[in-house]
Image: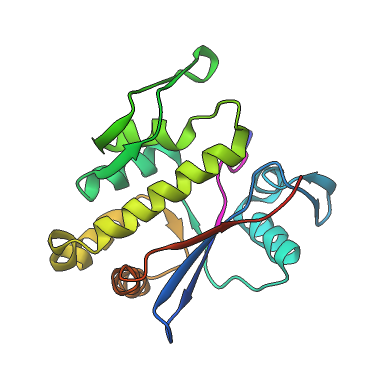
Amino acid sequence: GDAGRSDTMFVVMYDPKNEQVSLLSVPRDTRVKIPGHGWEKINHSFAFGGYKLAQRTVEELLGIRIKHHIVIDIKGFQRIVDAVGGIDIAVEKRMFYEDPYDNLVIDLQPGMQHMDGRTAIQYVRYRDEEGDIGRIKRQQHFMQAMQEKLSSPAIVTSLPNLIKEVNALMETDMSASEMVTLGRAMQKASKQGLKTDTVPGT
């Protein structure tokens, strides 16, 4: 009966005038006032009230209004990576971690690798002495690689069909046509690269 906590939170902003896509990471342990629940870690907002409360909490934290939401679980994430044909990522160091309770094994060697969904989920979930901030850097690195993949010729020609396939793997209030528009916007913005930042804190 536990809805679970959001493992990763991104706010994605698109500036059509300058064809720029920006991604802001919200550290999951950020202490915020969750409406109706007092001061808590921001990732608890999803457990308390699903995406609606999580969205409202992020809006109040940042003083912005968010137009759409996308919720992806771990299985959906893996299948999306596989749907685009995998991602090329330079793994920056040896990564090994085991969590029998979560049935999780992370075992990655350093160097450039072509990752399928099963390998990519290990990369974005890995944490060590750098904690969640180090993991956020890897997640942003992954998103930059995903944007590069979306701008590849093979994806450009098959984007509408790919969006239909991917749309079934997530929960969102965006229509298929809006998803295609966003995908094409990310393709155009790939010339400038994905601008990333993280909500600061101590």
Q: Position of residue 161 (x, y in %)?
A: 19, 63
User: Residue at coordinates 68% horizontally, 60% vertically from top-left?
Assistant: 58
Q: Is residue 72 above or below residue 64?
A: above
Q: Is residue 71 magenta?
A: no
Q: Is residue 103 above or below residue 164?
A: above
User: Residue at coordinates 64% horizontally, 34% vertically from top-left?
Assistant: 2
Q: Position of residue 191 (x, y in %)?
A: 30, 71
Pick the front one: 1 or 94: 94
Q: Position of residue 93 (x, y in %)?
A: 41, 28
| 38 to the left or right of 128 | right
User: Residue at coordinates 46% horizontally, 45% vertically from top-left?
Assistant: 139
Q: Position of residue 136 (x, y in %)?
A: 54, 44
Pick the front one: 170 or 198: 198
Q: Tell me which segment is drawn in magenta.
A: 4-10
Q: Quadrant of the N terminus?
A: top right
| 194 to the left or right of 149 | right
